[in-house]
Amino acid sequence: SLARRCHDRSTAMLDVPFLPFCAFLGTLGLLCVAMVGTWCQHWRGGFSLDGSSRTFNWHPVLMVTGLVVLYGAAALVYRIPNTWSGPKLPWKVLHGSLALGAFVLTVLGLAAVFRFHNSQGTPNMYSLHSWMGLGTVLLFSCQWAAGFGAFLLPWAPAWLRALYKPIHVFFGSTILMLSVASCVSGINEKLFFSLKNGTTAYKLLPAEAVFANTLGLLILIFGVLVVGALARPSWKRPDSDSPDSRQ
């Protein structure tokens, strides 16, 4: 029918090959990391480990790099066509290793902000951003530990893996979107704190505000594209009941 042909044609127009999409997404992720680094270096004074505001600057860089970009890369491992056949174990190890790397960077990012707050006498955990961020990290740690136990340890029964897999997939996307929300709210909070005394007010939209707001939008776009890729049926690894799939 005409409607069917139009649907097929529109579907074909939206059919983006996975690898070019990944190349674009990787470029976007690197751009986010470069921009948050540039923001902290150019406008916020650079980096140090002395407990000053320059120590705090490690926090946004490590969080964006680990909790968003590296975590997004880990989430997309099983969408790579090469993972659809052959042994799954190397890809499981890669997926778990990328997630572990993201977790390590995230913990270092938390350590940076806690050290800054403690050295300046600033209270911890009072803002919505801090609650949401710490909740995301705790959920991430539970997700990684449960995934390691269910999918990488050899003695996990097949029924447990089958039961936990959709839960793991759901929380994978959920954690990424919580990470994006935490980063965007953190950028906004930092601008409100920083752009006041002795600087151009945030409401007047100085160059730093434009730059950081743009960074927040790019982080949001990155997260949405990763979740969209995870939800795309044609990019999902075919389920299999073969012994290889249960290794």
Image: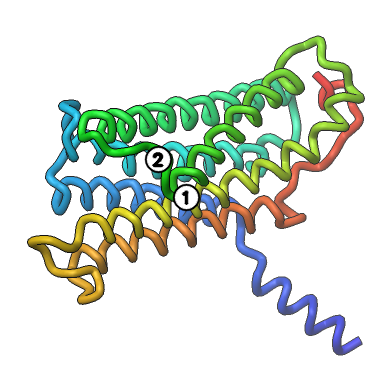
Q: Determine the residue positioned at 15% across, 53% down.
A: 43
Identify which amino acid the numbered label 1 is placed on: Ser
Where, by quadrant of the figure, is residue 51 drawn?
Answer: top left
Name the side, left or right, on which 137 lies relative to 81. left
Q: Residue furthest left?
A: 198
In the picture, which quadrant includes the C terminus? top right
Q: Determine the residue positioned at 36% across, 47% down.
A: 30
**Residue 171: mark:** none
- Establish if 7 lies above or below 172: below
Residue behind mark 2: 63
Report if the CB atoms under discs 1 and 2 are less than 8 Å apart.
yes
Name the side, left or right, on which 212 lies relative to 176. left
Name the side, left or right, on which 196 lies relative to 3. left
**Residue 182: mark:** 1
Q: Residue furthest top?
A: 155
Q: Depth-wise, is mark 1 or mark 2 nearer the camera? A: 1
Give the camera-side residue of 207 and 188. 188
Q: Residues within 10 Å of mark 2 (few under 14, many from 20)?
A: many
Q: Position of residue 189 (x, y in %)?
A: 34, 56
Q: Residues within 10 Å of mark 1 (few under 14, many from 20)?
A: many
